[in-house]
Amino acid sequence: MNTWIEIAMLALLLSDMALLGLSVLSTSIGVVAFQGVLLGGFALLAQHDVLSPRLLAIAVGTVVLKGGVYPYLLRRAIQEAGIRREIQPFVGYVPSVLAGVVMMGIAVWLGHSLPLRADLPLVVPASLMTLFTGLFLVTARKTALIQCLGYLVLENGIYTFGVAAVGEIPALVELGLLLDAFVAVLVMGIAIYRINREFDHIEADRLNVLKG
């Protein structure tokens, strides 16, 4: 079972690196949806010895929301906005991938420094790398939708780290995280639609023209 968990964490790391190098919005949404499905399976694999209806419900909810509902709402948002790709991010895609390599090195170093899940050496580094990737996307991209994806990736990192650190997160906390992310996606979808309707673009950095 540990082997499958490590494979899942390796896939999570590769998806983080892919997000740093992608400019096509629909593909980026697909990668984040893949992460959601992956984390739903990870919750079951990490706690396979204590399977319960609560755990199954959380795993299914994670897959449905992160792998289905969120991507659907975000794809609707880009269809309404008529935007296919991020053109000029604050940080280019090659430098972003290079920054990802540095972040991965830091994540691996921190992961081996923390006394958590020594039996699963990739879990903590993968969770930290996912968290770093989310923060990077929020700060290094101009398009509001990519920033929304960054928030979801950040939440994925927190979720993974929580499973690694605590083992069994209380159901109320897990449901709260899912609900927070759901509300954030709804609000961001509305914001993307309104920004595009008023300004014919969804680049958040250009909102500074509203300053008096």
Image (cartoon, rainbow, N blue to C red):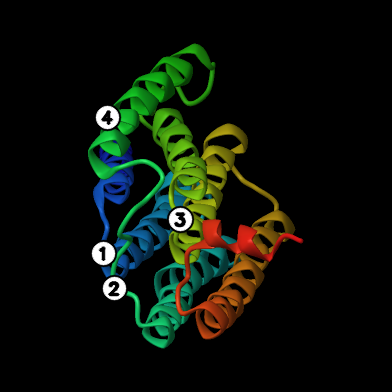
Q: Quadrant of residue 4?
A: top left
Q: Does residue 121 appear anywhere in the picture?
A: no
Q: Is residue 173 above or below residue 136?
A: below
**Of callouts 1 and 2, which one flags the residue occurring earlier in the amino acid sequence?**
1
**Of callouts 1 and 4, which one flags the residue occurring earlier in the amino acid sequence?**
1
Q: Do callouts 4 and 2 mark residues in contact (Cβ within 8 Å)? A: no
Q: Which residue is at 40% across, 70% downward?
A: 67
Q: Do callouts 1 and 2 mark residues in contact (Cβ within 8 Å)? A: yes
Q: Does residue 60 appear anywhere in the picture?
A: yes
Residue tagged 3: 142
Q: Which residue is at 42% across, 54% downward?
A: 39
Residue tagged 2: 84
Crowdedness near tag 3: few (<14), some (14–19) or many (≥20) residues, C-alpha within 10 Å? many
Q: Which residue is at 62% across, 62% downward?
A: 209
Of marks 1 and 3, the one in the foreground: 3
The secondary structure type at the circle numbered 3 is: loop
Residue tagged 1: 24
The secondary structure type at the circle numbered 1 is: loop
The secondary structure type at the circle numbered 2 is: loop
Find the distance from the CA under tag 4 to the CA under tag 3. 19 Å
Q: Is residue 120 left or right of residue 205?
A: left
Closer-to-camera residue (56/175): 175
Closer-to-camera residue (111/182): 182
Find the distance from the CA under tag 1 to the CA under tag 3. 13 Å
Of marks 4 and 3, the one in the foreground: 3
Find the distance from the CA under tag 1 to the CA under tag 2. 6 Å
Q: Quadrant of the C terminus?
A: bottom right
Residue tagged 4: 98
